[in-house]
Amino acid sequence: MSIRPFRDIKRKKTKAIKVGNLDIGGDNPISVQSMTNTLTQNSKSTINQIKEIENAGADLVRVSCPDQESTLALKQIIKEINIPLVADIHFHYKRAIEAAENGAHCLRINPGNIGDTYKIKEVIKAAKDNNCAIRVGVNAGSLEKDILEKYKEPCPEALVESAIRNINILENEDFFKLKVSVKSSDVFLSIGAYRQLSDKIDYPLHVGITEAGSFLPGTIKSSIGFGSLLLDGIGDTIRVSLSDDPVKEINVGNEILKSLNLRNRGVRIISCPSCARQAFEVINTVKVLEERLSHIKTPLTLSIIGCVVNGPGEAAQTDIGITGGGKGNHMLYLNGIESEKIKSEEIISKVVTMVEKKAAEIENDPKK
């Protein structure tokens, strides 16, 4: 039972490219990614973190490759993971070549920072030979010197000019398997740059508010920036940038897409903030259920409401619902219909059982 959106978002049609086995752009779903914070040369710890990111619902992952030990480690890492890998490269062209040769599905580079033309050509050749995509990654904190001198400070026009310049470098070498980002830690600068760039190119756009900060401020900044752009139909892949566990980046990214009805994966919980009317501990119940239901990938809606003021109305719109009642007797709803009364201590186990049962039914019969 899905909640019908009041507004259908019309996404801008971009070119579709393939990154590993993942289709990005075009009519394909918006993908969510994160970046590891382990030492890439430590294959074991990097693989373990990527698996955690995978399990959280990531579609692809980026790893930093600052040295040859890191690029050599990619061969082993890629064997052990199930999502495409993007190698993050800065300045040294040989690291990009090594990453492509060792199995990276995409290179994140700024061609203008690579150096001499022959170096750029070598990187492009390696990408072509190894069926590797390229992300042109422009960042307000590392603009080319001449562009920064021209505009005096980072601004949307500066980021867009840098992106177009770097795109032209690739296109001049007949390379078109690319996506582009124009990131800043400033929400308004990022929004302005992405809007301008979207009007000028039709390559897939990787959207991000870079260096957004710790969990709470970073989540808020990313939600504002992503929401503004996604509502305009801009964005084909996203990364929430937090000074925190990469798994949290995936969780926030997925929730942003779910809130805009752009992604339908996992359990969407509608819950009240709780008040003096609550007939059971709503906040703790929701926290426990979020953790206990994190393994569910089937799209489902669940309402957890502490009293009868809004509870029945919300339950009528969700697959499974709980409405708080008097004397510790609460109503369980299935498909919007009253099912049975349950006690406070039964809520979590009963809801988990019902959600798992419903998910299994849907998996076995997609028409449900």
Image (spheres, grey):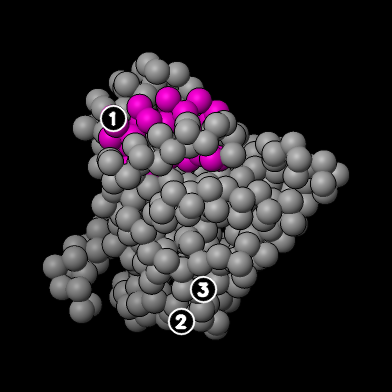
Relative depth, front residue between 328 and 25: 25
Per the rendering, the mark at residue 102 is 1
Question: Can you identify the residue that label 3 sits on?
Answer: 12
Question: How far is disc 1 from disc 3 in space, using C-alphas?
Answer: 34 Å
Residue at (33%, 59%) from the top-left corner?
A: 23
Give the Cα distance between marks 1 and 2: 45 Å
Three-letter amino acid code at the position of disc 1: Asn
- The label nearer to you, 1 versus 3, is 1
Name the residue type under label 2: Arg
Which residue is tagged 2? 4
At label 3, counting other C-alpha atoms closer than 10 Å, the crowd grade (few under 14, some 14-19, many 20 or more) is some
User: Looking at this view, is 50 or 278 the one in front?
Assistant: 50
Viewer-side residue, 340 vs 44: 44
Q: Does the magenta portion include 231?
A: no
Which of disc 2 and disc 1 is earlier in sequence? 2
Q: Is residue 168 left or right of residue 47?
A: right
From this view, report whether residue 231 is shown above or below residue 48.
below
Reply yes or no: does residue 99 show up in magenta. yes
State which region is magenta.
89-111
Closer to us: mark 3 or mark 2? 3
Whether residue 104 is visible here, answered yes or no, is yes
Dot placed on the residue nearer the N-terminal end, 1 or 3: 3
